[in-house]
Image (tube, rainbow, N blue to C red):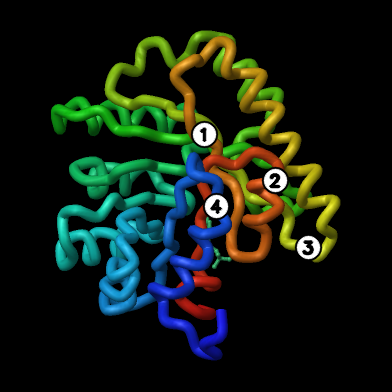
């Protein structure tokens, strides 16, 4: 791009140019003002990601209803109720307890909520998520069968924050292989959420279908 200071809409357009058609771009607007989200909407962006429930609620109330809100960060059980009425996709489900709570609240609300199971793929231990063997056991144990108001659409993960391209690629590949191994028993899955500002190109090469990009669009936080 020749413009030395591209607009938010320009940045979105240039990321989209690089995306295969089946990949969804979630613009991560956490900490950014509503005006920045409106700027992004100029580029027909409708998928936005937030990681704090209160901020998500405030933005949802103030902005157009056409927006598809993604809860991308760690979600506490006691916050589920607040987002269930409107959330489009919950990315970071990391326990059975959380899943059961989403199911219960969604049922009360007369809707079915889409969600992704977060897998721990990074070497850093502060990141949340299932360990792959635990997740496989959980799913093969048919634990999802009784949950009629939460619909699992696939998996989400975050790679280690490192300049080591090969390590990041390895972690994303591990997640994709896990996703594929579980597809046999979950044929309705269609979403593999992986890739952020620093690593989305690697994630796409490794089979991502959904990237979550914040600072490359909206600037640093
Ligand atoms: C903040 C955040 C992102 C976006 O991070 P950037 O590096 O700014 O693109 C993606 N996913 C999750 C879970 C996040 O919390």
Q: Answer yes or no: do the residues labelled 2 and 3 have beta carbons within 8 Å?
A: no
Q: On screen, 40 above or below 24?
A: below
Q: Is residue 188 left or right of residue 158?
A: left
| SS at badge 4 | loop
Q: How far is the residue under mark 2 from the one under mark 1?
A: 21 Å
Q: Position of residue 168 (x, y in %)?
A: 77, 51
Q: How far is the residue under mark 3 from the one under mark 4?
A: 23 Å
Ligand 1 lies under 8 Å from the Cβ of mark 4? no
- The residue shown at (53%, 51%) is 211
Disc assigned to residue 162? 3
Q: How far is the residue under mark 1 from the one under mark 3?
A: 23 Å
Q: Position of residue 128 (x, y in %)?
A: 59, 46
Disc assigned to residue 205? 2
- The residue shown at (73%, 55%) is 160
Q: Nearer the viewer, mark 2 or mark 1?
A: 2
Residue with the mark numbered 4: 19
Between discs 2 and 1, the one toward the N terminus: 1
Question: Which residue is most to the front?
Answer: 2
Q: How far is the residue under mark 1 from the one under mark 4?
A: 23 Å
Between discs 1 and 3, the one toward the N terminus: 1
Other residues around mark 4 within 10 Å, as few (<14) / some (14–19) / many (≥20): some
Ligand 1 lies under 8 Å from the Cβ of mark 1? no
Ligand 1 lies under 8 Å from the Cβ of mark 3? no
Q: Is residue 150 left or right of residue 23?
A: left
Q: Nearer the viewer, mark 3 or mark 4?
A: 4
Residue with the mark numbered 1: 117
Q: Nearer the viewer, mark 1 or mark 4?
A: 4
Other residues around mark 2 within 10 Å, as few (<14) / some (14–19) / many (≥20): few
* Residue 198 lies in quadrant: bottom right
Between discs 4 and 2, the one toward the N terminus: 4
């Amino acid at each position: 791009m020749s413009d030395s200071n591209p607009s938010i809409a320009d940045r979105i357009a240039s990321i989209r140019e690089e995306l295969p058609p089946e990949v969804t771009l979630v613009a991560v607007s956490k900490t950014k003002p509503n005006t920045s989200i409106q700027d992004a909407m100029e580029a027909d962006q409708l998928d936005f990601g937030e990681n704090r429930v209160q901020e998500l609620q405030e933005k949802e109330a103030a902005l157009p209803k056409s927006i598809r809100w993604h809860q991308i960060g760690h979600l506490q059980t006691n916050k589920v109720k607040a987002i269930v009425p409107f959330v489009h996709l919950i990315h970071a489900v990391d326990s059975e307890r959380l899943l059961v709570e989403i199911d219960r609240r969604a049922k009360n609300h007369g809707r079915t909520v889409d969600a992704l199971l977060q897998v721990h793929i990074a070497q850093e231990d502060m990141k949340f998520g299932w360990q792959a063997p635990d997740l496989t056991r959980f799913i093969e144990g048919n634990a999802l069968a009784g949950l009629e108001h939460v619909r699992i659409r696939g998996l989400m993960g975050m790679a280690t924050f490192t300049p080591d391209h090969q390590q990041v690629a390895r972690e994303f590949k591990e997640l994709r292989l896990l996703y594929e191994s579980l597809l046999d028993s979950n044929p309705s899955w269609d979403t593999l959420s992986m890739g952020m500002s620093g690593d989305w190109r690697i994630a796409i090469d490794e089979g991502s279908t959904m990237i979550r990009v914040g600072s490359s669009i909206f600037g640093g936080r």
